């Protein structure tokens, strides 16, 4: 074989290998960049879930607690009224007043023996706490996955061949999730 053909084959091989290397590096960078964008979208989705869910849960728990408070107040006041009926019996002046007081006593006795209303708001608070914890865990996991995607992407674009072949403006280095100042303090939940 003539030396010129060997040189041309060598140059062609180098060009082909370079093109395949560039294609591989570029395709991988595009894929990793898309993965980073997807992971950030998942973080945003988890934030939106929290924004949609938590206010509704708070209002549900508040409403249930207020309703329960009203019921318990009425039951307690009704049971406390039994003491006032005994005064009516002592002050009865005729048989009609005595009969009315007797009916009130029977009603009061039945009320006294009724089952006390079961308090459910404690369960509602526990469900709220579980939902809140679950939501925060989801958000934290999405942030961790985002940071892992950033690490893979940044590692790839800073590699030897990627550093040579990739445009830094098209594939800039990305920053992972970082907490806001003061985020180390737990948020206050008000009821």
Image (cartoon, helix red, strand yellow):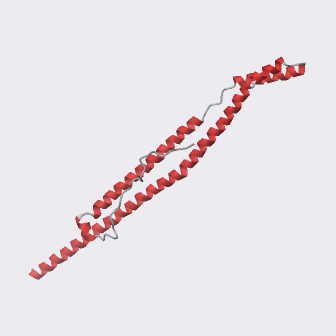
Task: Look at the image and tell me in which quarter the N terminus lies.
Answer: bottom left
Position of residue 171 relative to residue 92, above or below, is below
Give the residue at x 34% y 70%.
170
> Residue 177 location in percent, x, y?
38, 55
Residue closest to the far front: 182
Asked if residue 144 lies left or right of residue 81, the reply is left
Q: Is residue 66 above or below residue 6?
A: above
Residue nearer the viewer, 109 or 10: 109
Q: Which one is nearer the viewer's eye here, 19 or 117?
A: 117
Q: Quadrant of the C terminus?
A: top right
- In the image, what residue occupies the spot 52% across and 44% down? 189
Residue 182 at x, y percent in the picture? 43, 50
Residue furthest to the top in view is 90
Q: Position of residue 131 (x, y in %)?
A: 51, 44
Q: Quadrant of residue 43?
A: bottom left
Q: Is residue 7 above or below residue 189?
A: below
In this picture, residue 96 sits left or right of residue 21: right
Q: Is residue 11 above or below residue 153?
A: below
Q: Residue at x 51, y 51 (%)?
A: 50
């Amino acid at each position: 074989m003539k030396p010129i053909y060997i040189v041309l084959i060598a140059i062609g091989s180098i060009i082909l290998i370079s093109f395949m290397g560039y294609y591989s590096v570029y395709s991988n960078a595009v894929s990793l960049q898309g993965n980073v964008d997807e992971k950030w979208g998942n973080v945003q989705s988890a934030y939106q879930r929290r924004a949609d869910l938590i206010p509704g849960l708070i209002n549900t728990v508040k409403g249930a607690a207020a309703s329960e408070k009203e019921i318990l107040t009425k039951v307690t006041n009704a049971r406390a009224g039994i003491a006032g009926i005994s005064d009516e019996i002592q002050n009865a002046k005729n048989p009609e007043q005595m009969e009315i007081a007797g009916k009130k006593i029977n009603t009061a006795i039945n009320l006294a023996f009724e089952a006390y209303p079961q308090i459910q708001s404690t369960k509602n608070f526990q469900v709220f706490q579980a939902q809140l914890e679950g939501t925060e865990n989801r958000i934290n996991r999405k942030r961790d996955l985002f940071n892992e995607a950033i690490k893979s992407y940044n590692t790839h674009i800073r590699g030897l061949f990627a550093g040579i072949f990739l445009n830094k403006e098209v594939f800039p280095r990305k920053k992972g999730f970082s907490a806001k100042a003061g985020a180390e303090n737990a948020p206050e939940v008000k009821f």
